[in-house]
Amino acid sequence: MEELKTGKIEYKTVEKFLISLKNEFGGRKGESVKVAELRKLKQGERTMKKFVQEFKRALRGSGYERKPLVKEFKRGINGAIRRKLMETKNQLGSIEQWYKMATALNENWRESRREEERLRGKKEMSGGAPKQKQRQNMP
């Protein structure tokens, strides 16, 4: 539905759409394809919000639920976020809690990076010596 609203359709041909539709709703054989797709999914440079959307899309028809579902989600998110979530005081239970906390952590980290860039830019413009780039740990 989002693709229709934004006008960005994922499928270039009817054939690709029909293949995707068959994989999405094709029964047992489709389930194994969905599991493989889910297991290959990695966050990479995407925002957590975008990754969660793709994860939910891949999840439909996979047969995953509860703990195995959380395990697949943890496998796909970036390591730094996964470590932060695993270190939380209150262990997360449901997949929805994982989605929510992972998204919040990722948004906070991205906001922090933007602020650091903004402050670094101000310092350089005011004549301060430019510092070497620090290595980024979280996506």
Image: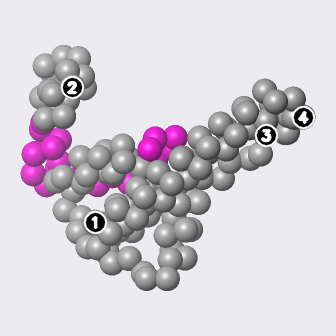
Check disc 3 and report the residue beneath it.
133
Instruction: Give, as a three-letter code, the residue at label 3.
Output: Lys
Instruction: Give, as a three-letter code, the residue at label 2.
Output: Thr
Q: Residues within 10 Å of mark 1 (few under 14, many from 20)?
A: few
| Mark 4 vs mark 3, CA separation in Å | 12 Å
Instruction: Give, as a three-letter code, the residue at label 4.
Output: Ala
Is residue 129 positioned above or below 61 on the image?
above
| Mark 2 vs mark 1, CA separation in Å | 25 Å
Q: Is residue 54 magenta?
A: no
Q: Residues within 10 Å of mark 3 (few under 14, many from 20)?
A: few
- Residue 129 - label: 4
State whether the magenta stretch is mostly helix, strand or loop.
helix
- Residue 96 - label: 1
x 42%, y 58%: residue: 104
Residues marked 3 and 1 touching at CB (< 8 Å):
no
The range drawn in magenta is: 21-47
- How far across and how far down the image is residue 80, in percent? 59, 60
Q: Earlier in the sequence, mark 3 or mark 2?
A: 2
Q: Residues within 10 Å of mark 2 (few under 14, many from 20)?
A: few
Is residue 26 positioned above or below 82 on the image?
above
Compare residues 53 and 101 and report the one nearer the observer.
101
Check disc 2 and report the residue beneath it.
6
Q: Earlier in the sequence, mark 2 or mark 1?
A: 2
**65 left or right, relative to 52:** left
Label 3 secondary element: loop
- How far across and how far down the image is residue 9, in percent? 21, 23
| Mark 3 vs mark 2, CA separation in Å | 36 Å
Instruction: Give, as a three-letter code, the residue at label 1.
Output: Glu
- How far across and how far down the image is residue 128, in percent? 87, 34
